[in-house]
Image: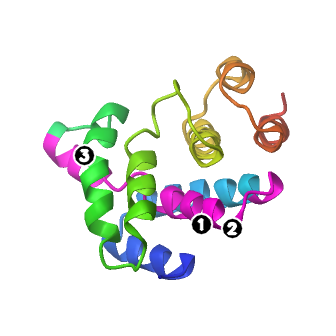
Amino acid sequence: MMTISQIMEKMIAFSEGNIHDIDHFIRVWAYAKTIGELESLDADTQYILEVSAIIHDIACPLCREKYGNTNGKYQETEGMPMARGFLSDTGLTAEQIDRVAFLVGHHHTYTNISGADYQILLEADFITNASENGYSKENVENFVNKIMQTDSGKRLAKQIFGI
């Protein structure tokens, strides 16, 4: 099974020099890794979370080309099969690939959240998007109060955004 660093290197190569995309997934991965460790996830769930964080936006280049934007629903639809293909030679089990593909295919869906890995991926991606896109304090507070579930994610968001 590939290490997180090997998957990171593979995703960097896949990104073909798109610095924005690379910086984004590295930031999401760093927040996801941090929150997961602070929440004491078991090793397998932590691994799935980190792989998912690294490849969560795998469909963005295709969406830009095919649709002219990276709408979250397009990312989810296109990302699931892309995640499966990307991970096919990594040594992950079929069950692990299924879970990562599910997370990639739902990382913009804030309802029926199942599992700590799913919850933390949403939180890490939101923190990153909020900082990259200058979300208002009201928007961040709303997300923290209504969507965030982990104590660690809430604490980080409050510290990062001064709320």
Q: CA distance from mark 3 to mark 2?
A: 28 Å
Residue 16, magenta (yes or no): no
Q: CA distance from mark 1 to mark 2?
A: 6 Å
Q: Picture coordinates of residue 113 (x, y %)? A: 56, 32
Indicate the secondary structure of the residue bearing disc 2.
Answer: helix
Whether 49 is drawn above or below 43: the answer is above
Q: Residues within 10 Å of mark 2 (few under 14, many from 20)?
A: few
Q: Quadrant of residue 128?
A: top right
The earlier-in-sequence mark between 3 and 2 is 2
Q: Residues within 10 Å of mark 3 (few under 14, many from 20)?
A: some
Front residue of 158 and 110: 110
Q: Residue at x 77, y 35 (%)?
A: 161
Q: Residue beneath label 1, please? A: 47
What is the three-letter code of the residue carrying label 1?
A: Tyr
Q: Residue beneath label 3, please? A: 78
Q: Picture coordinates of residue 43 (x, y %)? A: 68, 67
Left or right: where 143 falls relative to 15: right
Is residue 16 among what the camera can see? Answer: no
Stretch of the chain drawn in magenta: 37-66
Type of secondary structure dominating the magenta stretch: helix
Foreground: disc 3 or disc 2: 2
Q: Are marks 3 and 2 in contact (CB under 8 Å)?
A: no
Q: Kindly identify which numbered label has been placed on residue 43.
A: 2
Indicate the secondary structure of the residue bearing disc 1.
Answer: helix
Q: Are marks 1 and 2 in contact (CB under 8 Å)?
A: yes
Front residue of 39 and 163: 39
Quarter occupied by the C terminus? top right
Left or right: where 42 falls relative to 132: right
What is the three-letter code of the residue carrying label 3?
A: Glu
Whether 141 is drawn above or below 39: the answer is above
Q: Residue at x 49, y 74 (%)?
A: 8
Residue 43, magenta (yes or no): yes
